[in-house]
Amino acid sequence: MLKNINKTKALHITIIIIGAILMLLAAFHNNIWFDESYTVGLMNHSFLDIIKIGIHDVHPLLYYLLLKLFTIFTGNSIIAMRIFSVLGMVLLSIIGYTHIRKDFGEKVGVIFSLLISFLPVTLLYSNEIRMYSWAAVFVLLTAIYAYRITKQGKTKDWILFSIFSLFSAYTHYFSMMSIGLINVILFIYIIRNRDKNKNIVKWIASASTQIILFIPGILVFLLQALRVATGFWIEIKYPDILIDILKFNFLGAITNEWVDLFVLIFAVILFIYLLVKSILEYKKDKSKAIVPIISVAIYFGVIAVALLISNISEIFTTRYTIPMIGLLALFIAYILSVSNKKITYLVCGIIIALSIYNAVIFFNNNYNEDNSKLCTLINEEIKEDDIFVYSDINLGAIIADYYPNNKQYFYNFQNWSVDEAYKAFAPQMEVVETLDKVEDYSGRIWIIDGNNNKMYDIISKYKNINVIKQQEKITTPYKNTDWVISLVEKE
């Protein structure tokens, strides 16, 4: 059987396997940060409760439901949940072999899979217990079947196009924006080629079906948009955000300032080259170059729309581009496939070098022994009736997942409208706007602070407080998180 596989196919398969192993090896740890802790918390609830709670979050629900289904077979461990994200990114790489190779040629397919396997950003987000890798799969498949419709217009392609459009919209709102543009571009193509293509009726049927089936998603979106309209955590600064967009896919976990500068220079030169080369290729052969050019236009088009909306309400952060990473990778892969070999090898070589450097940092952050300091410190003293109190939800949510058997209070002193959304951490965590329950409590209290001593300063002033464990500051390398832990007893 191996004799029938040519060298290019063998290389392609090897790239996918190496990338999959790299992503998988990074996943065997129990560290989480706030966004991941929300996913972990939700998985402790039923399907129905995930829907009830999730509609108060800021993301669609399909990923959570798919992950819940996955955990029925694998168990609710953090590692199992992380592997589900790895599978999504590996599948995205495999699409380079199963779809892109067939539609755009072996060379494009190989480079695409190499990019997905080794871009620093994909290693990072293949390991996030979030929806990003699966959103990228659904968006890319939507684009691929839209392209196949323009070539053949088979009923099967229309059905798959509609399904993956819906999956995209129900997975992430930037996916929804992406497939919205894909649907519009497909419609324009069909209208302009109406004499050659009889797909107008099918497009109307597909679009109508998508809209009808996404009505629940629209209602959830409106509910979520209204809830966050008056205050959101995202803050956009110019020109910083534009620089971050350029560097984002090539940095991953890299923080070295000199490498950061190199990446910026590399990204600027690369994108200028890709732009010029794509224009030349379009003039040379419009029919071949148009699809990758449209792909990158969708990628940057969604970013542009999000930045414009952000002038009213800030909704954009660089990680929200991950659902479109397949479109960007297709564009880069195509342009490199028609470039001089030396340029292609140089670009791919730099990306692999950055990938190796990023992997060293990423693995060290994930598997650093200092990550265990938090639980070690708490486990030395924790008792069944101890309670936790915190005002920083970024830290508290992690504690809620790690210590589900201890009562906890999140002091929501800023009065965020999060009561329903944070039921993901129930029953152990309760959102409170006052500390009356803590002040009336008698027993041991774990105080969790971050970069300030807000909770300690408040609770230490209560009457009859005895300090059992003085404040101790630790930093966990995973996401470089600062903690200040103390334990007091209130008589």
Image (cartoon, rainbow, N blue to C red):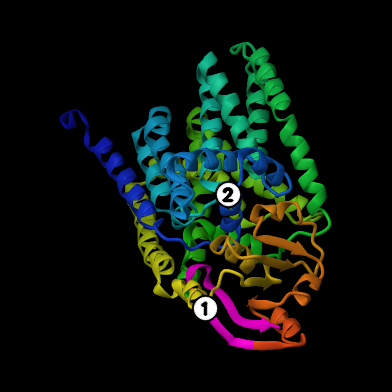
Q: Which residue is mark 1?
A: 381
Mark 2: give few (<14), some (14-19) or many (20+) Cα within 10 Å. some
What secondary structure prevails in the magenta region? strand
Q: Is residue 4 magenta?
A: no
**Magenta segment boundaries in residue numbering:** 467-491
Q: In the current view of this chain or complex, which residue is farthest to the left?
A: 3
> Residue flagged by tag 2: what amino acid is it?
Asn
| Residue shown at the point (76%, 56%) measured from the top left | 419
The picture quadrant where one finds residue 384 is: bottom right
- Residue 205 picture location, percent across and down: 68, 16
Question: Is residue 150 in view from this perspective?
Answer: no
Label 2 belongs to which residue? Answer: 44
Q: Residue at left 22%, top 31%?
A: 5
Label 2 secondary element: loop
Precedes in sequence: disc 1 or disc 2:
2
- Residue at the image position 56 percent from the left and 53 percent from the top: 40
